[in-house]
Amino acid sequence: MPMYTTKLTFLFALICLVGFAQKKKYEIIEPPSKEIGDVLEKRMVCIYRNIYAPEARLRFFPFNEYKKIVLISFELPEASTDIVIYDTDKPLVNAPDKKEVDLPLLTKKQKLDQTRIKEKKILSTFEIDKLTDILYNFGYKSTKSYKGLRIADEGYSCYNPRNAIVFLDEKGLIAEYIEICFECRRREESSEKIKSGEFCTEKYDLIRKYFYAAGIKYGTNKSKN
């Protein structure tokens, strides 16, 4: 085959490949229809399935490793606008007084800062049993896909956490935690190893009521927070 023919063939193949890639890159994905949305929403409803007995629930991480569990409420510190970055290679002239920078309240391998906690409740064996029952025995009505789509955790874009489930080690240090913003229906977990169950539609409200019944009012009382 002549050299110019080979080059033309290669160029044509390259153009086709680039065109296909561009078409694939900018392919428009249509949002699910109302029918699909309604079906998936119904499947996200919580149902109580009573699958896991008390001893089985305690085999989930971190309940299987840490026995001292605390519910807390707290206020996030206000973000400071007075942040100064110094050039350490030059002497400081008329430098302002050094201010202490606080660590985040929930920091692993640190003690809970009691001065920043509004409310605290150490859970009894009975209360841990109730908590694990909510986490692991309430789940989605169905996890089956519908027309290629699956259900996903819902939540808002905001995040102003005021509550947390904290797991302490034998030294009283923070080992793991589940930080929760009930207002925004979102959470942050300290480790990917944590098994917190399926967060079906009513799960946040079930946990919120559990906190409230345990005496944790801040962040859980809808009429005041």
Image: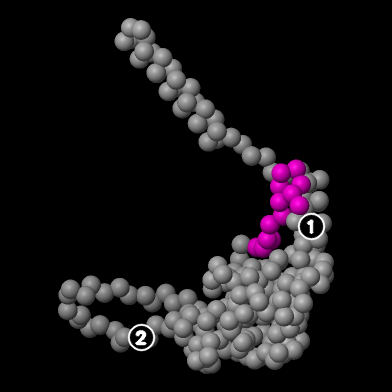
Left or right: where 51 falls relative to 67 = right
| 143 is within the stretch colored magenta | no
In this rendering, the count of numbered labels is: 2
190 relative to 14, above or below:
below
Q: Earlier in the sequence, mark 2 or mark 1?
A: 2
Task: Residue at 61% x, 89% y: name it.
Answer: 68
Q: Secondary structure at mark 2?
A: loop
Which residue is tagged 1?
Answer: 142
Any part of residue 156 in sight = yes
Q: Residue furthest top?
A: 2
Image quarter of the C terminus: bottom right
From the viewer's side, name the closer residue of 23 and 132: 132
Residue located 59% across and 84% down the image: 66
User: Dot 1: few (<14), some (14–19), or many (≥20) neighbours within 10 Å?
Assistant: some
Label 2: few (<14), some (14–19) or many (≥20) C-alpha neighbours in 10 Å: few
- x and y percent of residue 104 in the render? 48, 79
Q: How many angstroms separate mark 2 from mark 1 (CA)?
A: 53 Å
Residue appearing at x 66%, y 77% in the figure: 59
Please provide the residue range marked out in magenta. Answer: 144-156
In the image, is 40 to the left or to the right of 62? right
Does the stretch in magenta take in 147? yes
**Depicted 60 relative to depicted 6: above or below:** below
Q: 3 left or right of 58?
A: left
Q: Amino acid type of disc 2?
A: Lys
Visible in this render: residue 221?
Answer: no
Per the image, label 1 sits on a secondary structure element best described as: loop
Residue indicated by mark 2: 99
For the residue pair 66 and 123, the one nearer the viewer reads as 66
Residue 150, position as x, y percentages in the image = 71, 51
Instruction: Give the residue type that dot 1 points to.
Output: Ser
State the image coordinates of residue 133 (x, y, percent, origin top left).
76, 77
